[in-house]
Image (cartoon, grey):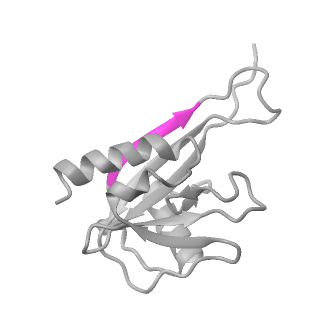
Amino acid sequence: MAKIPTLLTVVALALIDAGGRVLMQQRPVHRAHGGLWEFPGGKVEPGEGPCAALVREIDEELGLVVAPGDLFPISFAANEPASGEQAGARPLVLLLYGCRLWQGTPVCEPGAALVWAAPEDLAALAMPPLDVPLLAALGRYLKNDGK
């Protein structure tokens, strides 16, 4: 029986400002998906819950303080690498949370860029494949529940 690779859990955050704009981060060009725009976040470490990981990642990546109680789930996306895909490819689940409250001013890491974009402008940004369905879910949230 083939060994099933460990699921990689990644968390991402849609920071939504008072005007309804969303903060997006452009990945440094030297990284995987370099130059593409994504929701900021990162990997959940062993023994860490998704909200704790997101609080840590947003502090590390953007220098912002978010409280776990201010995070709300929006959607998730997943991939399952096909047999024959690159060696070591792992199945991945990307959990998107939203947040309207934070402390600080976002500062991007070296080689990255940040933009506050109106929801209707987000689709024009080139994104990694798993961010695309999350963007659609965020659009539904903002249209229906997030007014």
Residue at screen point 43% across, 79% down:
65
Q: Nearer the viewer, residue 65 or 113?
A: 113
Q: Nearer the viewer, residue 31 or 117?
A: 117
Q: Nearer the viewer, residue 65 or 126?
A: 126
Estimate the x, y position of residue 92 in percent, counting from the top left.
Answer: 59, 39
Q: On the rendered structure, is 88 left or right of 109? A: right
Residue at screen point 33% across, 67% down:
21
Q: Residue 25 appears in which quarter of the rendering?
A: bottom right
Residue at screen point 47% across, 69% down:
55
Q: Residue 7 appears in which quarter of the rendering?
A: top right
The range drawn in magenta is: 73-79
From what the image shows, is residue 24 above or below residue 97?
below
Q: Quick check: is 72 in the magenta stretch?
A: no
Q: On the rendered structure, is 4 left or right of 21? A: right
Specify the quadrant that holds the C terminus.
bottom left
Q: On the rendered structure, is 27 left or right of 66? A: right
Residue at screen point 47% across, 55% down:
50
From what the image shows, is residue 114 above or below residue 87?
below
Q: Main secondary structure of the magenta part?
A: strand
Estimate the x, y position of residue 73 in percent, counting from the top left.
Answer: 33, 52
Estimate the x, y position of residue 136 in percent, counting from the top left.
Answer: 37, 43
Picture mark count: 0
Q: On the rendered structure, is 9 left or right of 145? A: right
From what the image shows, is residue 93 above or below residue 21?
above
